[in-house]
Amino acid sequence: MPAPTPLRPLNELRSLDELRSLDELRSLNERMPAERTSFVGRRTECADLRRLLGDVRLVTVTGVGGVGKTRLALRTATEARRAYPGGAWFIELAQLRDPRLLGHTVAATLGCPPRGADQLLATLTDHIASRRVLLLLDNCEHLVDACAELTDILLGACPNLHVLATSRESLRVAGETVYMVSPFPVPDGHDARRHAASDATTLFRERARSVRPDFELTEDNRAAVGEICRRLDGIPLAIELAAVKTRALPPAEILARLSADTEILRHDGRRVADRQRTLRTCVDWSFDLCTPQEQLLWTHLSVFAGGFELDAAEGICGDERFAEPLLDLIFSLVDKSVLTYEPGAERGRFLLLEMLRQYGQEKLEESGGWQAMRRRHRDWYADLAARADQEWTGPGQQSWLSRLRLDHANLQLALEYCSSAGETTDGLALARSLHRYWVADGRFAEGRFWLARTLGHTGNAPRDQVRAVHTAGWLAILQGDLPAAGRMLEHGTELVATGLDTSEAALITQLAGLDAMYADKPGAVDALEQALAQFRRDGDLNREQETLALLTLAAALSATPEATRRYHAEWVAIAELRNDHRLRSYAEWAYAIATWRTGDPERALAVARAALTSRPDHLGFALCLETLAWIETSLGECATAAVLLGAADRLWERMGTSTVALPALFRFRRRCEVRSRKALGRRSFDAAWAQGAALSSEDACARATKGSYSASPAGAAGRDPGCRLTKRERQVADLVARGLSNKEIAATLVISPRTAETHVQQILNKLGFTSRSRIAAWIADQPAGATG
């Protein structure tokens, strides 16, 4: 028998007759390609796509390059193929360059080559019209117009045809449903247990085992693997390219090389598509699909860190170089999966994934425009911070806090530019403008870091220096660094002595009152009264309200807590006038302390709970939890107090401080903890504290406002005292506590992943929990060998 004619790439074909004669092409494509590696995650996405295919006739799967569109679509089509008696057909288009050959490629795949070029559409529609068929058109982006035209014609002529397309850009055909595939979610930070249970980490492990069968996630490499996945934005292709390097490198070294050498992410497989051989070629493919104007905007948007909102893009990137409306270009980049749109409660945000941002930055640096864009970026965010500072006190505080949190990475980038460019005056002004944000969000150390990089420069005006010293002193006091706060006070006093006006002097006086209050020293009320009087003379309502809140607390902590009422009443009057409800939580918290100290704990409990439910910021939330614990102890609810102390301590740790560092508060904390430990016993107290530390912010708030916690083993779990786990459930619970995922539990116990998932859910139901972390806290409280 003669040797079969080898298949050649479609873009090498020289004639339509040669295309029609390729029987091998039809035989290869009349069934879905078999999977060669394990399919990880995407359960929800597969279910969504199968449901959509049952409801609509055209679904286009979009997403950034390397996100796994093809693999997801193939799995979905394979699972759904029984619903299509006429066949589910895979049509790979990445190698096809001439759009005129699209119809012929589809025809050859279906095994119905036309008798003439003018009969192509008639042949296709005749072949499909009476059949229920699924066409999977893979990689349409470079042929998007041709794919859209052919799909539109076929759907109109073939009522039983369904089309599943993958593309970095939607087809924009009537009746199309666009399904965006996101990268794998990657947990923030370095929580090894959360990383170990993520699909991104599972994918890394699976692909690493393909080149090193003995590869395991261990305590030594979990953090590095998790950080690799985070650095790569959870993009499956990038993770796979990194994982195969474990053949020669440990995860820690792969991580170390990622920043310096992205070419480490090169696939050395012999039959890997060129556009997927490296991340660089994958991104090149996307860049080449953009128009020159879209490419220019892409490079300009690389100046952002993390996400950004439309007003920032228009304010920083909008200029005369764009012949098209900027909004239209942004929409085009979203359509082409370069930008990701993330809806928000108030405003949506756009995101340029890190590998696309680095690519755009490289292009912008090559064109010589990088530094100019950095400066525009800095100027815009400095103005944003200044507006936030001016409008902070009032009904817009929550909105500003949310905005600054979302733009935190951009603010850091702006501050870093000021430092690296030697523009210390601008850096000082920006860091000082963020005073209220640093305090509210508990970012004490970070605020001090940026201020320290600019405060020592002699070029700063004395007035600006005083305001920055005031901010740095606040942060040092709240972090418990009282010696540093003393140095700031001394420095501020020296600056004021140079002849600054009374407004700047009042800031240092207020700082002195704050220091005396938290350090439990005399003179707090007197200093704050002096500052208040000056702010009133200046008509500075923001500072007046802020100082009244401090006076409310200073009086509450003093020997005469009943004096709090006057300050509190004045503060509430201003808050009502300004419709400021969020900052009210601080005054209510202080008033709760005063009420408790004057001998009315039940009333104090109600006031403190009301303060907690008024949506305080991170610092206010921790203070409310702490105070509620003190009050609960005085009411005999020591177990509840222990839970609240655990929840508060978790927040203090995140902020880099504690009540130990604040003597005025620590005296109450110490009494609360001593009494609770004595009432509960060490083991029960520690168990309740651990449960509190494991609570989410929402659960902690619910527990604080609900109260009533039993310190018994059953109560510590939050479950029915009569509930008992079976022996198998206890085994599963132990593995959950060790941080294993359902799949890892299944492998350990030699059961199916679905069975492991069922056991975990049953445990959660029995114990009355909503998260795996609470199972871990419960396990820690159980005697060895217990099953309930």
Image (spheres, rainbow, N blue to C red):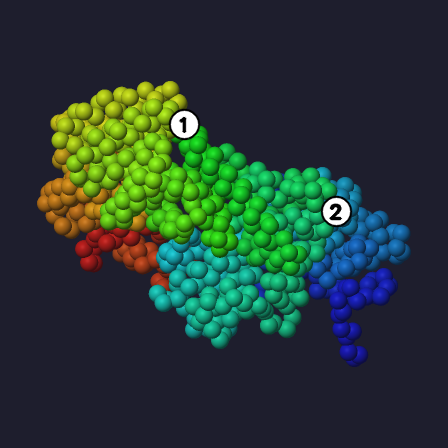
Horizontal side of residue 374 vs 505, given as left or right:
right
**Three-letter amino acid code of the residue under disc 1:** Gly
On residue 743, which mark appears?
Answer: none
Horizontal side of residue 466 vs 677, given as left or right:
right
SS at badge 2: helix
Choose top left, top right, bottom left or bottom right for residue 160: top right
Q: Point out residue 263 in the picture as x, y percentages from the top left corner.
A: 57, 68
On residue 148, which mark appears?
Answer: 2
Q: Residues within 10 Å of mark 2 (few under 14, many from 20)?
A: some
Q: Quadrant of the N terminus?
A: bottom right
Horizontal side of residue 779 vs 249, given as left or right:
left
**Three-letter amino acid code of the residue under disc 2:** Ala
Q: Earlier in the sequence, mark 2 or mark 1?
A: 2
Q: Residues within 10 Å of mark 1 (few under 14, many from 20)?
A: some
Choose top left, top right, bottom left or bottom right for residue 332: top right
Of 310 and 270, which appears nearest the observer?
310
Residue at left offset 23%, top offset 54%: 780
Label 1, on which residue? 394
